[in-house]
Amino acid sequence: MKLAVCINHVPDTTAKINIAADNKNIDKTGVAFVLNPYDEFAIEECLRLKGNNGGEVIAVSLGGDTNKETLRKALAMGADKAVLLKDDSPRDSSSVAQALADYLKEISPDIIFFGKQSVDSDSAVVGTMVAEMLGLPSVSVAVKLEISNGSATVEREIEGGKEKVQCTLPAVFTAQKGLNEPRYPSLKGIMAAKSKPIEEKVPAAAQPKVEVIALHKPSLKSAGKIVGNDSSAVPELVRLLHEEAKVI
């Protein structure tokens, strides 16, 4: 079984983000980048499927040389091969999906995994876009997956509950938190990953359909107001909630 997992190199969620001088990108100065958290569940699921069914796990990432750091973590976790689609030009979700789909079409994997979304742009559409471009069935926000006789039974999250669906392979899945518990890379895996080659390919030039006009930070929240510290403040609080906040 050939399993492909598409991963992204994103700013650490604890990092302080500032807008770059061009107002179209973030300022990367001093920002730590990590493997996209949802992609860890995707990698782990591919490794478990390999353990149960045999085959190989191929980690794929689109970006510049810095993405190799994230690919090496995937190798350290147990991926067999890493491929960098080398292009650090600005891309929207559509052009990212197209570059990934072009490569995945070349290798024809049985299963393609993504994290449910990337925590930098949070669009949560690249996985399903790739499935559409490849003409494959897709199931998003998977929290349980079983493979048997060329088909998959998937439990996925929906608002207010879960649903169970079936599809044939090959197929595309996006991983939700709770699908599994990602493993920590072992010291042996980390050392081995340092010497493993990362294949580089140059994708077709980006043809984005969306242009970033400007980035800006949210407006600062207004300061809080203390109207009293005992029951005598209740009438004033009610008045403020009604007249200023307009929530009652």
Image (tube, grey):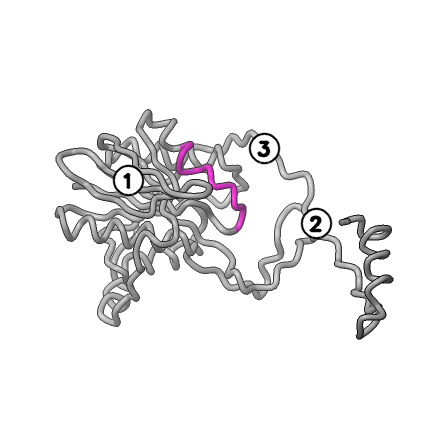
- Amino acid at the residue labelled 3: Val
Q: Residue 55 appears at what percent x and percent y?
A: 15, 46
The residue identified by callout 3 is 210
- Amino acid at the residue labelled 1: Val
Q: Residue 34 appears at what percent x and percent y?
A: 44, 60
Q: Which mark is residue 216?
A: 2
Q: Residue 140 appears at what percent x and percent y?
A: 38, 39
Q: What secondary structure is the stretch in magenta mostly built from?
A: loop
Q: Residue 24 appears at what percent x and percent y?
A: 65, 45
Answer whether labels 1 and 3 touch (C-beta < 8 Å).
no
Q: Which residues are magenta?
A: 120-129
The residues bearing labels 1 and 3 have C-alpha atoms spaced at a distance of 32 Å
The residues bearing labels 3 and 2 have C-alpha atoms spaced at a distance of 17 Å
Return the disc, 3 or 2, that comes first in the chain's sequence.
3
Q: Say what secondary structure mark 2 lies in.
A: loop
Residue at 16% in and 33% down = 150
The residue identified by callout 1 is 154
Residue 200 visible (yes or no): no
Q: Quadrant of the N terminus?
A: top left
